[in-house]
Amino acid sequence: MKIAKPHRLDKWTLAHRASAMLFLALLFLGRYEWFPFLKGSAASTRLFNAIGFADPLAAFEAMLASRQFTVALLLSAGLLFVLYALVGRAFCAWICPLGLLLELNDGLRTRVNRFLRRRKKSLPDFQLPRHTKYAVLVVFLILSLVVQLPIFATVSPINLLARSVIFGPDAGLLLVGAIVASEYVSRRAWCIALCPLGAFYSLLGRFAPLRIQIDQENEKRGKQCGLCAYYCPMGIAVLDDHIKKGKVAVNDPECTRCGSCMDGCPRGNLRLGISNPKGF
């Protein structure tokens, strides 16, 4: 049964999409000498040509491949390591170029499915186990160690998409296109079940204090509609696994803090805030 969404501005959805678009725009401008503010790629950036940031997973792969631990790389990765330990898997919603593309594609997929349903048909939706991505992560780390190359950083569709935006289309877009097409068979399969970077950030932010908080008192006084879970792009059972169990915040490591559940809640009983990671 279709659930009606409250008629109001989806401010959190607009905000995280704008943030990801801004990141891509800054990377694109960074290719020019006259723009010193942010230069690099999705895996490694430099702010004001002074402060370096390195994707912790890419840095870990590089260290495994080279069998060396450099102070510069540890410091660059350490900054983001601490950040994502505090905010969880927020990169996926607020920064990731591929996440942005797949979210926009999901909106198109919904429209296609709606068109098909009017004709008593529908798109398939084969759900892969969401823990598959942890196995994929382990495989890439082992390969990096054995082959002595940072394998995922090399073939990452996230990096390939960002590079195509910065320097122009290349063959890497074929992989990105294949992932986009696969979403019409298995909805959000990459983000939920396959992305090793998402798996890494889920592990890193397992006890992150920044979480979607739940106003349990207001929830008890009103009808629990389930819109929060319905609009969660990661398939998190916000109602059944959190609200009904009396939890004060969403503690699922897959949560990207995208805010879609907050946009969907008609009574405003969800908000983004700091919670005690042990208080669930």
Image (tube, rainbow, N blue to C red):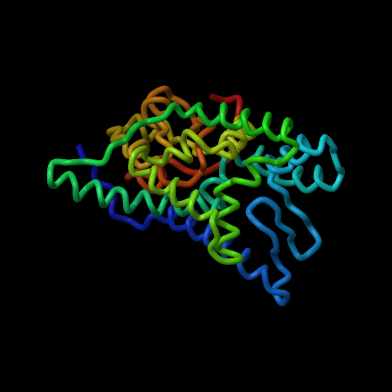
Where, quadrant-wise, is the N terminus in this rendering? top left
| Residue at image location 86% in from the left, 42% down from the top | 70
Q: Residue furthest left?
A: 119
In the image, residue 114 sits, relative to residue 23, either above or below, namely above
Position of 98 with respect to 27 (left or right) is: left
For this rendering, which residue is in front, 251 or 58? 58
| Residue at image location 54% in from the left, 54% down from the top | 172
Q: Residue furthest top?
A: 245
Tag count in the figure? 0
For this rendering, which residue is in front, 249 or 17? 17
In the image, residue 266 sits, relative to residue 206, either above or below, namely below
How far across and how far down the image is residue 231, in percent? 35, 42
Is any atom of residue 276 visible in this view?
no
Q: Identify the image quadrant of residue 61.
A: top right
Q: Identify the image quadrant of residue 228.
A: top left
| Residue at image location 71% in from the left, 67% down from the top | 37
Position of 95 with respect to 55 (left or right) is: left
Q: Identify the image quadrant of residue 83.
A: top right
